[in-house]
Amino acid sequence: MGIVKINDQLHEEIRKASTVMVRSINAQAEYWIKIGMLAEANPSMTFSEIMREQMSQADVDLRKVIGG
C-alpha cells in the first residue's frame, strides 16, 4: 500500500462523492481508479457494460437484485 498525492480540489470532490456513494474516501478513489483502468483497457465498452461484466465476474445475479 502506498500514498497517492492528489490536489486538494480533487480530494474534496472524492470526499463529496464518497458520502453519496456510502464509501470511505479511499474506497471511492479506489473505485474510480479501477473503473478508469477498465475503461481505458476496454474503450469500446460503456460504463454499464463494464459494470455488468464486473457483476458477472463476481457471480452477482442481477435478476435477483432487481427482482426480475
Image (tube, grey):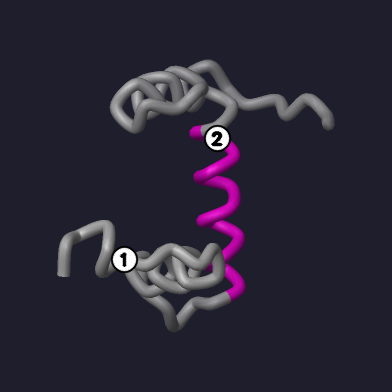
Q: Residue 31 magenta-drawn?
A: yes
- Quadrant of the rendered image containing residue 41: bottom right
Q: Residue at x 39, y 70 (%)?
A: 52
Residue 45: percent from left, percent from top: 42, 78
Give the quadrant of the C terminus: bottom left
- The answer to whether residue 10 is left or right of residue 26 is left
Bin the neighbour count of mark 1 within 10 Å (Cα to Cα): few under 14, some 14-19, many 20 and up.
few
In terms of depth relative to the viewer, which is nearer, 26 or 63? 63
> Would you say the magenta stretch is mainly helix, strand or loop?
helix
Q: Residue 34 magenta-drawn?
A: yes
- Residue ID for mark 1: 62
Count of residue discs: 2
Give the quadrant of the N terminus: top right
Q: Residue at x 53, y 44 (%)?
A: 31
Vertical position of residue 23 compared to residue 54: above or below: above
Residue 18: percent from left, percent from top: 40, 26
Start and end of the magenta stretch? Answer: 28-41
Vertical position of residue 15 compared to residue 57: above or below: above
How far separated are the C-alphas under marks 1 and 2?
25 Å
> In the image, what residue type sits under mark 1?
Leu
Q: Residue furthest left?
A: 68
- The answer to whether residue 13 is left or right of residue 28 is left
Q: Which mark is residue 29?
A: 2
Q: Secondary structure at mark 2?
A: helix
- Quadrant of the rendered image containing residue 22: top left
Q: Residue at x 29, y 27 (%)?
A: 20
Bin the neighbour count of mark 2 within 10 Å (Cα to Cα): few under 14, some 14-19, many 20 and up.
some
Residue 10: percent from left, percent from top: 48, 27
Q: Secondary structure at mark 1?
A: helix
First reached walking from the N terminus: tag 1 or tag 2: 2
